[in-house]
Amino acid sequence: MKCSFTTILNKYNIVFLLLFLPAIFYLYAQVTINKPAIGFTQVCANSDFNKFEVSFSFSPSGSLDPSNQFILELSDASGTFAVPFTLSATEKPLTATPTSRTFIFSVPTSIGGESYKIRVRSTSPASISPVSNVFAAYYKIQDSQFSINNFNSTATYCTGGSYLLTIDNPGTGTNDSPLKYPSLTYKWFKEPSLVPIATTASLTVNQPGRYYVETNYGTCTSDSYSNRVTVGEALGASAIITSSKGNPFCPSDGPTTLSTQAGNSYQWFNNDVAISGATSQQYQTSTAGKYSVKVDFGGCSSTASINLQDVPFTGSLNVSSTTIINEGDTKTIIATTDASNPKFEWFFNNTLISAAVSNTLDVTEQGAYSLTITQTTGCISKKELPFVINFPFVDPNITKIPNLISPNNDGINDTWILPQEYVSGTNTEILLLNSRGEIALQTNNYQNNWPENALDFKSVNPIYYYIITTQDNKVKKGSITVVK
């Protein structure tokens, strides 16, 4: 049979289509999406922050149909995708490559749990990625401090009874009560434990302690927590007195207010003597001392006490009241204080050293020094720290090598003083060994200054052994006993 050219050409076209079209179909028929990479271990979102990123890659390159869409799906709180939630997501600009994408997504306001996962789904061709690593996720719908017990910091129950702590709703002032959000749950704590003792909106207390509650946002940190309330038992347990200006307090700022728990009646005491007329829940004072109050709760009573102090700040120096330095040496004096915004004034023989205004002073001369520290903010007050700098006593007529020293900064026998023929400038080698044969000092320029640092010993007086070798090889040997 004869075939025309047109017939042959048509046959080739059919063959070409049969071979090429499956290739096109195969090109868009499958894509492999790899496990999504999340740049976080927690999603802790709120109204001010709810943007997170996820990246993923896929293969082969060019396998996506032009109509394809990538969809981010979120599991439930247990990590399963029985009913996946489609996340609100947009592709991050300028991050796409032929085989990868980065998306920015937001989580729903109802999210809350420790075992969420994300997966990626493509539409054309249809494919689903492996799931991401597990992460905690919470939307903090209420993320501010709130009050319990009407902001009262103390509460009391009688023996055998209990006290109910509740989250205030709405509370006083601008209190943002989490009870306005019915979906929230809570975690109650008794300090110092970090293990929750209840998850309800109220807590019945029958043990003394300090209690507070947090909104349950799992491992996410938040500002959604309450004030602390110290609950005490009225009989057989001491209650708490608080000072409005702290303890210690600053009398120059005016009186502090002492407060105790709410009760039926009160009587305040100063040094165990009843204060006439002091029969309210609060008592004001500008005087330090021991204060106590007896509170009648009706059916039982309790006594609380406080040792009120007026010490405003502390200050100390790194030297003792009398310190020995060698002539020509420099000693750095360092002051340490917890004063607020301190001012430092150094004095030498009762004369202000005007250039010294920091907490350090380099001294080279012997004499009487002092430092005045002034707390310039808060409680305005001063503290004076005197000290004396002495040079070691050196007798130019000394002819014997001492075998006893007492380095206690009293100016006498504080260092090992040798005759002039063995000290600096004579090229005499001084070698000191401790009782274990270890070298404690070796020098050809001894300056009568050993020991330069304090020797640490308690009950047994240590013994050191010396070998003195002069320039003409004359040797002196002996021992030194160190006493306090």
Image (cartoon, rainbow, N blue to C red):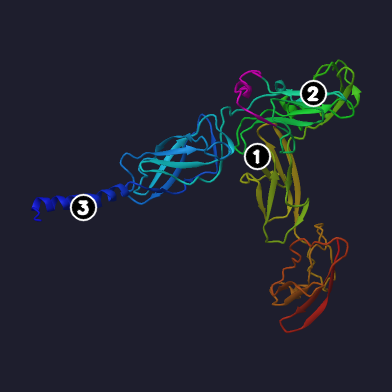
Give the percent coordinates (x, y) of residue 385.
Answer: 75, 44
In the rendered image of this protein, does residue 464 appear above or below residue 26? below
Whole-number angstrom distance, CA of label 3 to CA of label 1: 97 Å
Residue 271 visible here: yes
Q: Main secondary structure of the magenta part?
A: loop
Q: Earlier in the sequence, mark 3 or mark 1?
A: 3
Residue at 85 percent across and 60 percent down: it is 458
Judge from the rendering whether residue 189 lies leftward or rightward of residue 101; answer left or right.
Answer: right
Question: Which residue in the protein does label 2 denote?
Answer: 163
Whole-number angstrom distance, CA of label 3 to CA of label 2: 89 Å
Whole-number angstrom distance, CA of label 2 to CA of label 1: 49 Å
Describe the element under mark 3 as helix, strand or loop. Answer: helix
In the rendered image of this protein, does residue 263 appear above or below residue 431? above
Q: Earlier in the sequence, mark 2 or mark 1?
A: 2
Question: Residue 15: which numbered mark, if any?
Answer: 3
* Amino acid at pointer 2: Tyr
* Amino acid at pointer 1: Lys
Residue 256 visible here: no
Judge from the rendering whether residue 225 lies leftward or rightward of residue 133; answer left or right.
Answer: right
Q: Classify 10 Å Cα crowding around label 1: few (below 14), some (14-19), many (20 and above).
A: some
Q: What range is drawn magenta here?
A: 169-187
Q: Earlier in the sequence, mark 3 or mark 2?
A: 3
Give the percent coordinates (x, y) of residue 286.
Answer: 78, 25
Give the percent coordinates (x, y) of residue 417.
Answer: 79, 68
Q: Residue furthest bottom?
A: 473
